[in-house]
Amino acid sequence: MKKHHAEKLALALVFIFKCLLPVLPAVAGLLFWKKQYLLNYRRTLDKMKIHLNAISNGPVQHYFEDILRFNPEVCEPVQGHCSQCGNCCLNRQCVFLEQSGTDTYICGIYSSPLRRFSNCSSFPINGHDIERYQCPTYRVVSPYPVMHLQQI
């Protein structure tokens, strides 16, 4: 998929979600079996507005360009672990992100099979992902062992 097509597809998807915004809390509540999305409709709706603005600034296009297309040039070897900082969750703007401690967060839909179709299940695929969300624990590693030589 060319970059131009990915950009147009991303814009169309965000537009569709914005048109469906009033029903999205109910849809999310049913899809993820989370009744609090319906019980706290106004709060969920406000969080979804923030979420849609956040995904319209690149993550949806990144999904179509890099994730769905499986471009081998995009992927880099990455090492690390999740520190539950919430940065990769649209800089803590994801509607599904839930605070679990003072500075820790968990994904409210982590165990859902639908989550694997999102950007979330592929984070991070490269240094750009790590840099974009200022991830404190992942880093790009060299695919080849580096041998440091000493001067004699």
Image (cartoon, rainbow, N blue to C red):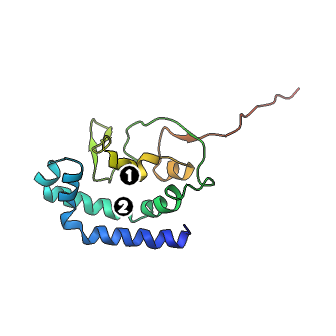
Q: State the image coordinates of residue 64 (x, y, percent, origin top left).
A: 48, 62
Residue at x-position 38% and y-position 53%: 90
Q: Between residues 82 and 113, which one lies in front from this camera angle? A: 113
- Asked whether disc 2 touches disc 1, contact meaning CB atoms under 8 Å apart, the reply is yes
Residue lying farthest left?
39
Residue 98, image x, y percentages: 26, 44
Which residue is at 62% across, 39% downward?
A: 141
Label placed on residue 54: 2
Count residues near mark 1 (Cα–Cα under 10 Å), then give few for <14, some for 14-19, many for 20+.
some
Give the mark nearest the N terminus, 2 or 1: 2
SS state under label 2: helix
Hey, what amino acid is under mark 2? Answer: Ala
Q: Residues within 10 Å of mark 2 (few under 14, many from 20)?
A: some
Residue 88 showing in the rendered view? no
Q: Residue 2 in the image: x percent, y percent?
A: 56, 69
Residue 105, by quadrant, is top left
- In the picture provided, is 94 more to the left or to the right than 42? right
Where does residue 130 sit, x and y in percent of width and height? 51, 48
Which residue does the numbered mark 1 point to in the structure image?
A: 91
Q: In the visual, does 79 lie left or right of 43? A: right
